[in-house]
Amino acid sequence: MSKTIIIWFRQDLRREDNPALHSAYEEGAKILPVFIEDDDTPKSWKRGAASKWWLYHSLQSLNTSLSNNLNLFTGKPQDILPALIQDTGADAVYWNRCYEPWRKERDKEIKKALEDDGVEVKSFKAGLIWEPWTISTKQGTPYKVFTAFYKNGCLEAGEPDRPLPAPDRLTYHNKVSSAVKLEELGLIPEKDWYKKMEKHWSIGEESAKNALSHFIKHSVDDYNTMRDRPGVEGTSKLSPHLHFGEISPRTAWHEVRKHQHMSKGSNKDSDVFLSELGWREFSYNLLYHFEDRITDKPLNEKFKNFPWQKNKNALTAWKKGKTGYPIVDAGMRQLWEKGWMHNRVRMIVASFLIKDLMVHWAEGEKWFWDCLVDADLANNSASWQWVAGCGADAAPFFRIFNPVLQGEKFDPKGEYVSEWCPELSKLPNKYIHKPWEADQTTLEKAGVKLGDTYPRPIVDHSEARDEALTAYKKLK
DNA sequence: TGAAATGTTGGGGCG
DNA sequence: ACGCCCCAACATTTC
């Protein structure tokens, strides 16, 4: 009689390059695929609304590719898994590792409890290319500077492992009767705000592969410059697929490498994309080594005394995309509608919230957490601290983005602003990033009434900048 | 993966 | 022809 192995899916919702699944398949075992929507996540980091919506579809897609054999549960894995083993007589549980602090701890306990009961447990690397404990400085300390981490740490560790093929013809254990329906996971909200997101995304493993090949075919060789143009298709848009593990970072890495070997041109641009995968690894490295100072406390303790403003009205205006700065508002509206924001604009809106409005970066972090389909603890936390200047290898605080100049530089034709702030779309390029400077005739011609159809700036950037710098200077 | 302030240079207007 | 000033253009420094 063949062995039955529970494959506990978490953030690895794919068949290809799935080491846990692959290993069970190679053993010729009967597979019992399981996903548990756990309720033991700390309150602040419960799945956000957009993230839930994505997960719903990703699970649906995974279930299809597992020939409807995915068993869904809600509750605590530490209760559900042993019960499941009791029910099915499964011999082993395999999973791919997660790196959130609370999951790490919990998984360790589950492993011990199961092993004490004579159940075999194996965990695998699937979500990262270089796991944090394998990369350290010559002194044995964790890297805190990206370039050193990536060049001397990651790249010196050698070419990443090749991705594993998807197993064909899996043998499944019978579906478990206690499993619940996808609808019962509580992932789809009552209000149907997500309808508008549906047209922006195609979810699941196959879509993730398509997104990657589309990116490699059309954008990767102009990545270095075009990735900064929010009005243009220049980025990979892989982030949600990577977060849920619909595609592995190793696959992305090696597909780009393959392209590099076959293409005649320079690899400069595609190398920049690979280094972005490196930034993802760096974020996980920080989360792993500095977990208590990553998600809401500043890594740089000097910032504990920063005079953050509880500016509720400003925060609301920011969230709604009504700050009066077109590039900021366009970004915030894109986030709301699409569950995603272009990376260049993420930096601009974050700089604006933190430095122009002097609102604590954790407020922005929370809002992104709820709105982003790619909400990811490591990336979101590290990136907010990066902009705030209090993270590892962070942008210095005094590097304050000017929303007008950023708009003019990276959205020179106003395409991005026009798409997300259509009320401004008839303004000439010269004024589309600063409508308050346009004369009355120009405004009327474009159908813009400041303070009515579009807000006036809620702060004066130049004054706000001075105030932020003054506050920063007082820190010691 | 900035922007503003400050410094330097050099051409051209002009007495 | 010369010195002086103005100011763009560019470079450097500072936040």
Image (cartoon, coloured by chain):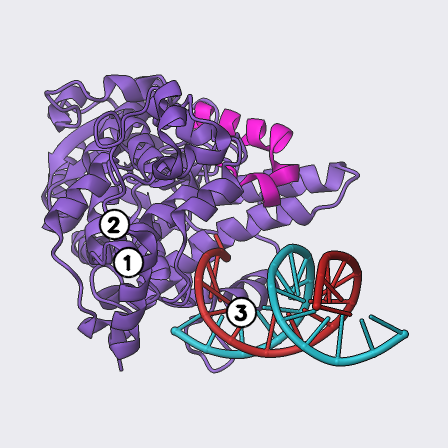
Chain colours: A purple, B red, C cyan
Nearest the viewer among A180 and A246 is A246
Residue A375 position (above or below residue A461): above
Which segment did they paint magenta?
Answer: A205-230
Please provide percent x and percent y for residue A77: 15, 43
Magenta highlight on residue A51 = no
Mostly what secondary structure, the magenta segment? helix
Estimate the spatial distance between the alpha carbons at disc 1 and disc 3, rounded to whole Å. Answer: 34 Å
Of residue A448 and residue A38, the one placed in the foreground of this image is A448
Within-10-Å neighbours for mark 3: few <14, some 14–19, many 20+: some
Considering the numbered disc 2 on the image, is that residue within a helix, a strand or a loop? loop
Give the residue number, with chain letter if any, for mark 2: A459
Same chain, marks 1 and 2? yes
Q: Chain of mark 2?
A: A
- Letter of the chain that mark 3 sits on in the rendering: A
Q: Please name the amino acid that badge 2 sits on.
A: Val
> Is the residue A244 above or below the residue A473 in the image?
above
Seen in the picture, residue A378 relative to A71 is either above or below; the reply is below
Q: Which mark is residue A148?
A: 3
Q: Are marks 1 and 3 in contact (CB under 8 Å)?
A: no
Report whether mark 3 lies on the same chain as mark 2. yes
Residue at the location (39% across, 57% down)?
A283
User: Which quadrant does the N terminus of chain A fall into?
Assistant: top left
**Is residue A60 toward the left or the right of residue A438 in the image?**
left
Q: Residue at x 63, y 29 (%)?
A: A217
